Amino acid sequence: MVKKIALFAFILVSVLDLLGIIFKIESLLYVFKPFVMLALLFLYTSSVSDINKWYSTALIFSFFGDVFLMYSGQLPFKIGLISFLIAHILFIRIVTQHIKKVSFLSILTAVIPFAVFLSLLIYTIKDSLGELLVPVIIYGFTISMFGVVSLINYVETKSAKSIWMLIGAIVFMISDTLLAINKFYLPKEIFGVLIMGTYIIAQYLIYRSMVLDTKKSSNEH
């Protein structure tokens, strides 16, 4: 029962936040965007009996990232970037715990697509980054590493939890790519809802992986 309430709360605040973006209702944005990750944390804690502290902490840092990115200016953007950077480092830690064996070939195969993608993105937006060039590169490298380790883990295990995590990492990269393009290269109104929509989906996919990763879950799968 609690889990159903938590799922409803997550869907509700996500939809209201997206409606705020679509219809440019700032009150909806400022009220409900911070609650998206809090609702997901509530959903996670009500879905499992063994709570992963690293994942819970990642959701908290994602919450802070959401809050700071609501405000304009370079300082809030940098703080938001750092918050999500920490969240991704925690995601990486969670995934690497499941990787038992790796070969040079598997690492190289996983690195190449993400390295090419990141290089093309940085090359596209670099002229508009200014003093944010280094922070954005560091962040881009970190989220790419999240994708790399998720791909390695999936290739090794071929499990349901690893495919959810991999897809979540890829969708997260898509969301951040759209954010970077919108902020530094080609601002478009449509990007707002696409950025938040893909972000919510990515976080939910990672949640699904984490629920499958626990010994006991409340009938999530």
Image (cartoon, rainbow, N blue to C red):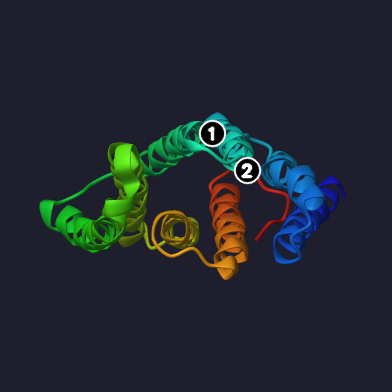
Residue, disc 2: 70
Q: Is residue 217 left or right of residue 142?
A: right
What mark, if any, has residue 197 been given in the picture? Answer: none
Q: Say which element carries label 1.
A: helix
Question: Which residue lies most toward the bottom here?
Answer: 190
- Disc 2 marks which amino acid? Met
Q: Is residue 100 left or right of residue 67?
A: left
Q: Residue at x 59, y 50 (%)?
A: 207
- Disc 1 marks which amino acid? Pro
Q: Is residue 142 left or right of residue 37?
A: left
Above or below, 17 against 93 in this view is below
Tell me the quarter of the image containing the C terminus. Answer: bottom right
Where in the figure is residue 206, as x and y percent of width and height? 54, 52
Where in the figure is residue 152, as x and y percent of width and height? 29, 55
Q: Nearer the viewer, residue 46 or 9?
A: 9
Q: Residue at x 71, y 47 (%)?
A: 33
Please report contact status of discs 2 and 1: CB closer than 8 Å, yes or no: yes
Badge 2: residue crowd in 10 Å (few <14, some 14–19, many ≥20): some
Q: Residue at x 59, y 67 (%)?
A: 189
Q: Nearer the viewer, residue 141 or 147?
A: 141
Above or below, 116 against 98 in this view is below
Above or below, 55 against 144 in this view is above
Of callouts 2 and 1, the N-terminal one: 2
What mark, if any, has residue 76 been given in the picture? Answer: 1
Distance between the Cα atoms at labels 2 and 1? 8 Å
Badge 1: residue crowd in 10 Å (few <14, some 14–19, many ≥20): some
Q: Residue at x 77, y 47 (%)?
A: 32
Where in the figure is residue 154, as x and y percent of width and height? 36, 59
Q: Say which element carries label 2.
A: loop
